[in-house]
């Protein structure tokens, strides 16, 4: 975004400079010749003559001056620049013009947070936490289409709380946002035939499908359809784009949802391929080689196409490839508008957009519900089933589950039982969260589950979490690496019922005297201590960390020679992390960041934060 910061009064110079530092591509303009600004003869003249070259304006000064300066250029909310006004004291940042479409509301919030001002936004949908329907499409890459009423009338009905049906027939980032922020007067549906239209005044539909609504409808067309194209050499392109559009519509899909146009490299310079880009204006283009397409199974392979291009298919194969191996919704169609100008096309639906079951393996963090990631928390809020590792994950983490969600502990289930309940929900097209302690990749037992998912070609993804070894470092107020002394952290476990690989025996790992975090080993602490003492000195610091970040967290410090005694006397169990190494409580060793050549980057402690002095820790 190209932004002009208009400095009306020199009193606001520092505010203008702080905003400029935060906004890439911004310049400060003034009539006063203030240092660091670009001189202009008059504000109104500058706006009139050069205003069209900027996406946004930020005025620093009186609101009246701002309003009079922009008045001559105001045309339409769909073309006006974003305008924000900040008073010269920096107390208020006001969204003046083009709040939604031009982005002034978002810019106002950014400016306010940069200078510590109060944002002033008067747009009703923003102040009532309602969706900004006129910018949703732009935000999520959807094409807009109205039916039965104008955009303004639909927005008016929606923001005034009229009963609204929301149809979501695909899923993407935008539909997840809508589900998560559903207003009370909106009811969500996932199938067209389920909507009792007579009960609603407005319909909002995120879908590539063509329907016949009887109430005012705002369609958002997501770019989930992928068009594959092949043709004879030098095929006449006249009318082909319109022909394909009509065929797509006849098949029940909107051409506005075509997200990409695809072909093989042999056809990349064909006039027909390039002409389609002017018909499907929002679509990207992809070119594939025959090697890219060789493993793609298609319903209509062709020996002739194989002979010419090296691939058994062009239209179907490139459509499937671009759709991430999603299903064909329109198999290969043959067309010819003028004699000798044959072409083929096919249409596939993006696999990721299919509204079907999905499993998210989520790292719960070490236990404190506030230490789950933002994404992990959002997954829990959206899940239809939460299956959590009850013996290791506090149930409090699941309290954010939506109404109607099923929450089950897997503590009493074997692997087959866990998979059975997850597959039951998955087969209904529902969203499952498998909640594991810490980070799932560390002793998370997810490999066996993923093996099941792969066997049944199920959709799944992993959201990482904070591991208990990181929680241990925080609780011990220790940096687990020491410059020039310890630069390695070893995550391992003692040998219990599960044998350790011969090369990973504790006494071999102990040779490096690195910081060692030992999981799941309280029950075999005698063996752990014996192996570690083969290479660590007896006085090496140790910490036994029980239920890190839980309400009943306990931490016991000592020396390695007393490790077994510490564990046994305090009856520490499975959820205990053992940390060994000189990094515990270490305050020696200087990072290069604090070496003499970098001292100029830091302020003197005397002028630092309140409560800070050179001889103490930060108190505030």
Image (cartoon, rainbow, N blue to C red):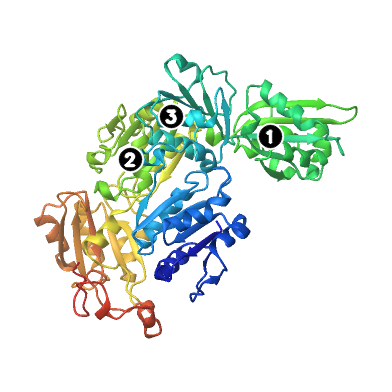
Looking at the image, residue 218 lies above or below residue 495: above
Residue at the location (17% across, 49% down)?
573
- Marks 1 & 2, CB-CB < 8 Å contact: no
Decide: few, some or many residues near mark 1? Use Cα within 10 Å; few <14, some 14-19, many ≥20.
Answer: many
Q: Is residue 440 left or right of residue 203?
A: left
Is residue 301 visible to the viewer in this orientation of the structure? no
Q: Which label belongs to residue 227?
A: 1
Q: Earlier in the sequence, mark 1 or mark 2?
A: 1
Decide: few, some or many residues near mark 3? Use Cα within 10 Å; few <14, some 14-19, many ≥20.
Answer: many
Q: Nearer the viewer, mark 3 or mark 1?
A: 3
Across and down, in percent, residue 351 comes to 56, 34
**Which of the pair 241/438 is nearer the observer?**
241
Looking at the image, residue 468 lies above or below residue 318: below
Q: Nearer the viewer, mark 1 or mark 2?
A: 1
- Marks 3 & 1, CB-CB < 8 Å contact: no
Write down the quadrant of residue 429 in the picture. Answer: top left
Decide: few, some or many residues near mark 2? Use Cα within 10 Å; few <14, some 14-19, many ≥20.
Answer: many
Looking at the image, residue 98 lies above or below residue 419: below
Q: Which label belongs to residue 180?
A: none
Which residue has dot 3 on it?
Answer: 158
Residue at the location (82% across, 41% down)?
271
Q: Earlier in the sequence, mark 3 or mark 1?
A: 3
Give the distance between the C-alpha atoms of the residues marked 3 and 1, in whole angstroms. Answer: 34 Å
Across and down, in percent, residue 113 comes to 37, 57
Element assignment for label 3 = helix
Which residue has dot 2 on it?
Answer: 435
């Amino acid at each position: 975004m190209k932004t002009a910061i208009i400095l009306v009064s020199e009193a606001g110079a520092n505010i203008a400079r702080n905003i400029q530092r935060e906004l890439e591509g911004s310049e400060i303009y003034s009539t006063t010749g203030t240092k660091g600004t670009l001189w202009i003869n008059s504000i109104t003249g500058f706006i009139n003559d050069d205003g069209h070259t900027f996406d946004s304006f930020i005025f620093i000064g009186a609101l009246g001056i701002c309003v009079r300066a922009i008045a001559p250029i105001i045309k339409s909310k769909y073309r006006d620049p974003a305008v924000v006004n900040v008073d010269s004291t920096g107390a208020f940042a006001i969204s003046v013009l083009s709040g939604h479409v031009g982005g002034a509301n978002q810019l106002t919030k950014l400016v306010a947070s940069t200078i510590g001002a109060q944002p002033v936004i008067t747009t009703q949908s923003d102040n009532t936490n309602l969706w900004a329907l006129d910018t949703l499409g732009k935000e999520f890459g959807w094409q807009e289409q109205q039916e039965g009423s104008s955009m303004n009338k639909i927005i008016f009905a929606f923001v005034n709380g009229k009963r609204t049906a929301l149809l979501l027939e695909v899923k993407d980032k935008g539909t997840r946002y809508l589900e998560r922020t559903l207003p009370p007067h909106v009811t969500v549906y996932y199938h067209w035939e389920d909507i009792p239209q007579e009960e609603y005044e407005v319909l909002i539909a995120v879908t590539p499908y063509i329907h016949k609504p009887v109430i005012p409808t705002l369609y958002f067309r997501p770019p989930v359809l992928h068009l594959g194209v092949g043709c004879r050499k030098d095929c006449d392109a006249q009318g082909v784009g319109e022909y394909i559009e009509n065929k797509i519509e006849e098949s029940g899909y909107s051409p506005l949802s075509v997200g990409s146009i695809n072909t093989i490299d042999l056809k990349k310079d064909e006039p027909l391929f390039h002409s389609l880009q002017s018909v499907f204006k929002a679509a990207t283009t992809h070119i594939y080689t025959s090697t890219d397409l060789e493993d793609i199974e298609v319903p209509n392979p062709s020996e002739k196409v194989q002979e010419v291009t090296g691939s058994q298919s062009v239209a179907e194969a490139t459509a499937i490839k671009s759709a991430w191996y999603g299903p064909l919704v329109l198999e290969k169609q043959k067309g010819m508008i003028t004699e000798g100008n044959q072409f083929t096309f096919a249409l596939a639906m993006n696999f990721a957009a299919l509204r079907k079951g999905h499993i998210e393996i989520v790292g719960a963090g070490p236990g404190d519900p506030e230490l789950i990631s933002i994404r992990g928390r959002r997954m829990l809020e959206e899940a239809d089933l939460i299956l959590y590792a009850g013996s290791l994950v506090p149930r409090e983490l699941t309290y954010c589950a939506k109404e109607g969600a099923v929450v089950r502990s897997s503590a009493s289930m074997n692997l087959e039982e866990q998979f059975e309940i997850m597959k039951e929900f998955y087969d209904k097209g529902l969203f499952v969260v498998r909640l594991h302690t810490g980070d799932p990749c560390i002793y998370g037992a997810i490999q066996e589950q993923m093996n099941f998912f792969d066997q049944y070609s199920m959709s799944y993804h992993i959201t990482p979490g904070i591991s208990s070894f990181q929680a241990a470092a925080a609780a011990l107020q220790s940096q687990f690496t020491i410059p020039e002394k310890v630069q390695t952290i070893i995550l391992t476990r003692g040998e219990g019922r599960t044998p350790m690989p011969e090369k990973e025996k504790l006494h071999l790992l102990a040779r490096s005297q690195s910081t060692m975090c030992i999981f799941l080993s309280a029950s075999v602490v005698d063996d752990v201590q014996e192996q570690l003492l083969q290479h660590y000195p007896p006085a090496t610091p140790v910490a036994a960390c029980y239920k890190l970040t839980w309400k009943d967290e306990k931490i016991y410090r000592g020396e390695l020679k007393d490790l077994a005694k510490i564990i046994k006397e305090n009856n520490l169990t499975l959820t205990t992390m053992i940390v060994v190494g000189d990094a515990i409580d270490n305050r020696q060793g200087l990072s290069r960041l604090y070496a003499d050549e970098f001292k100029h980057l830091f302020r003197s402690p005397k002028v630092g934060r309140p409560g800070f002095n050179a001889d103490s820790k930060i108190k505030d």
